[in-house]
Amino acid sequence: MARPLPNPNLDWPIPLAAVELIANSEGLRLHAYRCPAGLPTIGWGQTKGVTMGMVWTKEQADEDLCATLRERADEVLSVCTDKPSPYELGAMVSLQYNIGHGNFRKSSVLKAHNRNDPQSASRAFSLWNQATVNGVRQELRGLTARRAAEGALYLRPADDAPELRMPQAVAPQSSVAKSPIIQSGAVAVVAGSASVLGEVKEHLGVVGGVAASARTVIVDTLGIPVSALAPMLLVVVGGVVVWNRWKQRIKGWA
């Protein structure tokens, strides 16, 4: 059975696709109930002014959602220094409706949007997919799905845009090895390693052979010059950068 959707003929402040995304995520309840956080809730996820025992009609729920989204859209627009397209606005309103205006104002989504970086903004929606359940913070599939839908909606071209004509020849996924982040991390590792070896070589004199040098490094570890610490740190940081980038690719989001 199809889930109910809000009346499409109301004067919605955001595209109907965004309204339906929010409605499908929130669900419709016409009798007040307590949400998982214990708040009295009714309609399409409304908590403001709700008390237990309240009963609404669907028309009331739809009109309340429309009025609430108008307020939320105004709040989102008030912190956008780069004017959003209708779909960008709809996606950000959906996120703000779910996480609250305080969190939205500090979000990477808004920061990327305001610097006119739509690809980063779209990816940043996925950062808001965790909640605390039974005292444990964890990723939730429902939130992950909603964030993915919002990120896709954010990138949706205007209905009459030529970008809607999809190319049939799509480039393969980029190689991790060609990632600027991977390359910069590798450079850090190589540079740091070379510097560390140079420092150790200078410190040991490299005269007594490999075995003697290894013994000296192990026995006299604390005698390594302080100047070698920075290159060693460079190796560690570079290695961490490369490892984290690989983990991101394995998880499918970088």
Image (spheres, rainbow, N blue to C red):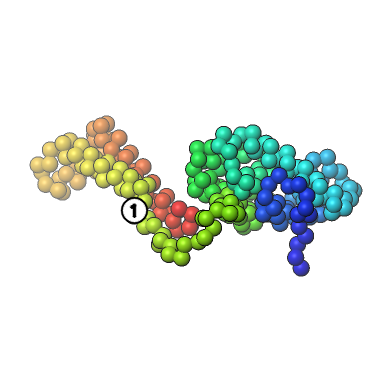
> Quick check: 153 above or below 222?
below
Residue 235: x %, y % from top left? 31, 43
User: Could you tell me how many numbered marks the image carries?
Assistant: 1
Instruction: Please report the residue visible at 70 percent of the width from the left and 55 percent of the height from the top.
Output: 20
SS at mark 1 in the image: helix
Instruction: Please report the residue visible at 19 percent of the width from the left and 46 percent of the height from the top.
Output: 214
Instruction: Please report the residue visible at 32 percent of the width from the left and 48 percent of the height from the top.
Output: 183
Residue 206: x %, y % from top left? 12, 41
Label 1 packing within 10 angstroms: few (<14), some (14-19), many (20+): few
Residue 164: x %, y % from top left? 54, 58
Residue, far top? 226
> Quick check: 215 above or below 28?
above
Residue 101: x %, y % from top left? 66, 38
Q: The N terminus lies in which quarter of the figure?
A: bottom right
Answer left or right for 213 relative to 116: left
Q: Amino acid at mark 1?
A: Lys
Viewer-proximal residue among 127 and 115: 115
Instruction: Please report the residue visible at 30 percent of the width from the left and 35 percent of the height from the top.
Output: 230
The answer to which image quadrant residue 110 occupies is top right
Answer left or right for 148 relative to 179: right
- The residue singled out by tag 1 in the image is 178
Q: Is residue 98 visible?
A: no
Q: Is residue 60 visible?
A: yes
Residue, far left? 207
Viewer-proximal residue among 141 and 170: 170
